[in-house]
Image (tube, rainbow, N blue to C red):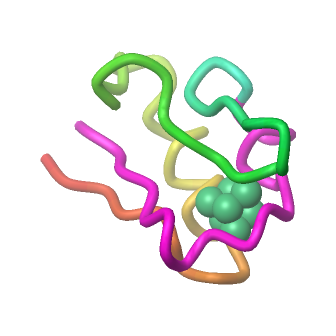
Amino acid sequence: MRIQVDSEKCQGHNRCYALAPELFDVDDYGNAMVIGDGSVPPELEERARLAAANCPEFAITISD
Ligand code: SF4
C-alpha cells in the first residue's frame, strides 16, 4: 500500500497527522506530506485508511 497527499487539496487540518503520525508529517503551515516515499507497512494500513477517511478535503489517496 502507498499513500499520497494532494498538496492542492490539503487545507492543513492536521487530522491525518493526529491519527497516524508514523505516516504523515506537517510543515510550518500545517499542510501535510507523507513521510518517506509514502509506502505503508502492513501494520499501519488500517491507520492509513482511517486517515484517508477522515481527511475533510479528500486530499489523501491510497493505492496498492
Ligand atoms: S487531514 Fe487532509 S487536509 Fe488535513 S492536513 Fe491531512 S491531508 Fe491535509
In the picture, residue 42 is in which quadrant?
A: top left
Query: Which quadrant, please, contains the N terminus?
Result: top left
- Residue 15 is drawn in which quadrant? bottom right
Q: Which of 25 and 50 is in front in this view?
A: 25
In the picture, residue 2 is in which quadrant? top left
Q: Is residue 8 magenta?
A: yes
Q: Which residue is drawn at 84% across and 37% down?
A: 28
Of residue 29 and residue 3, the one placed in the foreground of this image is 29
In this image, 45 relative to 51: left or right?
Answer: left
Residue 15 in the image: above or below residue 41: below
Residue shown at 36% from the left, 63% from the top: 61
Say above or below: 28 vs 14: above
The quadrant where ligand 1 appears is: bottom right
Question: Which sits in the foreground, 11 or 46?
Answer: 11
The span shown in magenta is 1-20
Magenta residue check for 18:
yes
Is 56 placed left or right of 23 in the picture?
right
Residue 51 in view in this figure: yes
Q: Position of residue 19 (x, y in %)?
A: 79, 41
Indicate left or right for 38 with 29 as reference: left
| Residue at (36, 26) in percent of width and height | 40
Q: Residue at x 74, y 36 (%)?
A: 27
